[in-house]
Amino acid sequence: MADLGSIFKAYDVRGVIPDTFNADIARAIGSAFARVIGGPAVVVSHDMRPSSPELAHAFADGVTSQGVDVVFAGLGSTDLLYYGSGSLDLPGAMFTASHNPADYNGIKMCRPGASPISGETGLNEIRDLAERILSGSDDAPAHDGPAGTVTERDLLPGYADYLRDLVDLSGSRPLKVVVDAGNGMGGHTVPAVLEQGLPLEVVPLYFELDGTFPNHPANPLDPDNLVDLQAKVRESGADIGLAFDGDADRCFVIDERGEPVSPSAVTALVAAQELKREPGATVIHNLITSAAVPEIVAERGGKPVRTRVGHSFIKATMAETGAIFGGEHSAHYYFRDFWKADTGMLAAMHVLRVLGADERPLSQITEEYSRYAASGEVNSEVADAPGRMAAVRAAFAGRDGVDVDELDGLSVTLPGGAWFNLRASNTEPLLRLNVEAPDDTAVARLCDEVLAIVRA
């Protein structure tokens, strides 16, 4: 039997083209998706990677082979796909590998209304059925009715209008905004959302769609990938810089000095705005988000709820709690008004609205939301990830005043307010370390101590 275990992750599909992921596999997954998830139709979109159109069309072939129609949206960001799934109340599939290198591709899938799919809620069943289809061992009766049809539909205008209705920027003071799309899908969506009759001067960087990423990887969490944006903000005297990842569902913010604004500070800022609109509301934060976020949410009268890392876990918790908003350390931001899905564009618009209504520069506005020093994500490639995790746990678990939990990876809280989380990546062979402490010296000390064990 074909083995797709290497490409099916906790909540999506990621593989190397063509070694572990190709059109035949995409077609089998499309057929399995139609049978497991069902629905009168499936919305399909894809990013700008060279392999994406072929994979998306193969997936659509698999869907229609089961008598299910396809609404083919063509080029789009992941949050545009979620808009299509939500507004049309249809399941969806987005072909992208987000920030992974150019030789990767993948699929982000959802149920109608952009509801998440994880291993426990259908993804494993889709994997198992696709494996049987590929190996010819599927003994279910073949679909004997007419094939589904494919209808092309441009979702971009509706997506842009929907976001602009949620966050009205028409009354903003004039702002100069540098946007680094990283040759990803932000180059497709930003002009439709931010360049149409608003008091914003958008200065584009790398808007040309190119899935080989000729300028820099489209991963704004890596500081090296922000250098060009930072320089352009300073050089142009811009009020703010925005960096999107490859599929434009994440957004990273740069202040007027060219300095990064942490995603945790953005989470706290947006949460504070949402709590003004709905006092007492629940706000979700993952366990790697700064401790400042639950503190600020509670101080503003909201209810903070901690959860695992990953969009399917955040969305499920939002559904359970009725949360108005959720944020992650990785610059994913989730909104109840956007079908509980993540959209970097909407988060950016919230920041722009706050900035546009305040004469202060962004660096001053965000000061109150930044309380602690942090390492950022530090990645280590190791041969024995479980063994290294166990060694770190053993080194810290017996100390006085230390709290250890394993909600997602290993989280360790030390006396004095320092903490760290060490977890395996869901998409790459890495251990990811995040450290927070009251000051940079304490962060560096704790980071060095943990890495000495991880990399021993």
Image (spheres, rainbow, N blue to C red):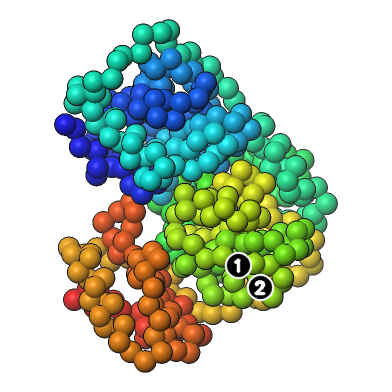
41 or 83: which is nearer to us?
Answer: 41
Residue 203 x, y percent position in the rendering: 63, 50
Amino acid type assigned to the residue bearing label 1 in the image: Pro
Q: Could you tell me how far apart the alpha carbons at marks 2 and 1 are, in whole angstroms?
A: 7 Å
Q: Which mark is residue 304?
A: 1
Question: Residue 59, relative to residue 125: is it above or below?
Answer: above
Residue placed under numbered mark 2 in the picture: 298
Q: Quadrant of the C terminus?
A: bottom left
x and y percent of residue 391 in the render? 22, 76
State the image coordinates of residue 323 (x, y, percent, origin top left). Answer: 63, 56
- For image coordinates 30% across by 15% down, the residue present is 141
Q: Are marks 2 and 1 in contact (CB under 8 Å)?
A: yes
Q: Of residues 335 and 152, which is closer to you in this image? A: 335
Q: With 196 as the anchor, is 342 left or right in this view? A: left
Amino acid of disc 2: Ala
The answer to whether residue 3 is left or right of residue 223 is left
Query: Can I make out residue 240 in this image?
Result: no
